[in-house]
Amino acid sequence: MKRSKPWPTFAMLMLGIDLGGTDTKFGIVDADGHIVEQAKIPTHAHEGFEKVIERVAHTARELASRHMVQGVGMGVPGPMNSQLGIVYEAPNLPGWENAPVRKCLEKLLGLPVVLHNDANAAAYGEFWAGAGRGCSNMVLFSLGTGVGGGLIINGKLYTGPDDTAGELGHMTIDFEGPPCNCGSRGCLEAYASATAIRRVVREALAAGVQTSIRIPQGEEETFGARLVYDAAVQGDPFAKQVLYDVGKALGIAAASIINILNPERLIYSGALTGAGEFIFAPLRDFARARAFRRPSERVEILVAQLGADAGIVGAAGLAFESFSC
Amino acid sequence: MKRSKPWPTFAMLMLGIDLGGTDTKFGIVDADGHIVEQAKIPTHAHEGFEKVIERVAHTARELASRHMVQGVGMGVPGPMNSQLGIVYEAPNLPGWENAPVRKCLEKLLGLPVVLHNDANAAAYGEFWAGAGRGCSNMVLFSLGTGVGGGLIINGKLYTGPDDTAGELGHMTIDFEGPPCNCGSRGCLEAYASATAIRRVVREALAAGVQTSIRIPQGEEETFGARLVYDAAVQGDPFAKQVLYDVGKALGIAAASIINILNPERLIYSGALTGAGEFIFAPLRDFARARAFRRPSERVEILVAQLGADAGIVGAAGLAFESFSC
């Protein structure tokens, strides 16, 4: 007798989309946070809202048609109303003024869509399937050109009524400190971002500080922290000090966050985390020394695990949270 | 025919207790947050945990016997585990090391008890029945000898896993600022507490700064901000500057909190709020100037409404939240 085939089991899947000014990434993600299939397309942001959203929908449909996708989560870089699914504006996406993103995408895909700020989506990704797995209260600091972040409170993404919660780069650590891009002064971002590192290095070189660091011609505005890290590894005292100061600023901000929110984990993502103990040693020291004992002993300070995938995984995770029963 | 009396209606009531190092306050509170009856006894903290808790239970029983009390909430000043109902230690309550407060009180009263940090209970009071009524996300700053606080997030008191969340006095506003009682430097409390004001005034007088402020003999460590306020009202420039600087520090901290938490309301309690626009004008200005536009336009900056009753009302409110069906 021939054995009949068992019924196929349909694992529930969601599509996560991480929309950026340059590229848009897609991931089909299962209920455990694993990426089943992924894709990347250029955003062609200059073409404006409708063209961009149609191109995104095209790739999303293609991926969804190959899988039993039940819903879509999308992270977008810009102020928004996640409840209404409207993006107010997006500095890197021309023409996205009061864009009804969710409604458009739902119509084009015939699937429910949940929309969030890209930094919040990435924070949720780490919480759901990365370094935050298993905890309930977590704060993510993303260290890039700027410093962003996201908050998980009582097991849920906390965005605040304007979806602006988690702007951790813009907490003050010295109210008379260096000017920040946001218009204020002495924000964490003015000390602990790639932009801040570039400023410090340029100023030091101009002042004739002794260091082995050399900025490649034409890269004054773009060179990465890697340049500083490599010099630090070679023992360059100035380079080590630059990274120490970044870690110190992060530790001071961490202490404030520990005292304010008593989180279980502080998680750091972004290229700067590659500097390892050059920044994490002072970060831990200043956090512990400046925060209350009990919550500073409790908190785990960790590096993010999902890298560039946090955005698609988190967006899909938020779709699971919204649409699975 | 005689009209028969209607059945009495039994409104649900809870007992709120605000245990302090000097006095302990009690309030029978209804479901709308109104105090039906209140009482106050000396704590006699030096007698130690068991005696204190027995005396508290005695008054609690007396009050409860006159009302249909369904449960008890209590605020205690000190680190604790609110889940387990244990106070780890309390600087102003000798002998309260790992004290099983909830269990003892439940046994003595035969009623369910919920325990919280006193600052958190007061914050909940303002949220439930004071200046925070009707919002979902609120931050309370209490301005007294020190600066404390409490967080309401998504309509619930957020305390963190160690019940230490909301230590808003110990967020850094200048990492190289004046030393703080907590062991760190440049905390908000080092700028915006009664202690900080006393330090600034004493130092200025010692340095011969021109001002009409005179500290009454023997009150160097105890004089209130009222002294500075009265001088400011009379036009004393130094006194006005002292209060301006307090407001500025509070505004800088408010901006960080607005960027981190995107709250609907910031509420200020404590004696210092009596200085009115001398501190609230710079507070609003610095908060708005340093925070992101959308959340800073959203946030309402308000004075607390319940005064010294916030603790008992909030403790009772937390009992309603825990024990009413």
Image (cartoon, coloured by chain):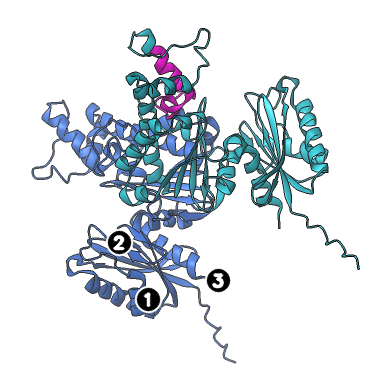
Chain colours: A cyan, B blue
For label 2, the residue is B88
Residue type at mark 1: give it: Glu
N-terminal of the two: label 2 or label 1?
A: 2
Which residue is found at the position 48% from the left and 43% from the top?
A: A139
> Which residue is more in the foreground, A79 or A138?
A138
Q: Position of residue A198 (x, y in %)?
A: 45, 18
Which residue is found at the position 66% from the left and 46% from the top?
A: A34
Q: Label 3 to label 2, Cα distance in Å?
A: 30 Å
For label 1, the residue is B106
The quadrant of the rendering that contains the C terminus of chain B is: bottom right
Answer whether labels 2 and 1 touch (C-beta < 8 Å): no
Depth-wise, is mark 2 or mark 1 nearer the camera? Answer: 2
Q: Which residues are magenta?
A: A179-203
Q: Is residue B31 left or right of residue B220?
A: right
Q: Position of residue A256 (x, y in %)?
A: 38, 40
Q: Chain of mark 2?
A: B
Residue type at mark 3: give it: Cys
Which residue, as the protein is rendered here, is positioned at the far right? A1
Q: Position of residue A62 (x, y in %)?
A: 82, 37
N-terminal of the two: label 3 or label 1?
A: 1
- Secondary structure under the numbered disc 2 in the rendered image: loop
> Which residue is more in the foreground, A54 or A65?
A65
Specify whether residue A44 is in view.
yes
Q: Is residue B94 left or right of residue A228?
A: left
- Secondary structure under the numbered disc 1 in the rendered image: helix
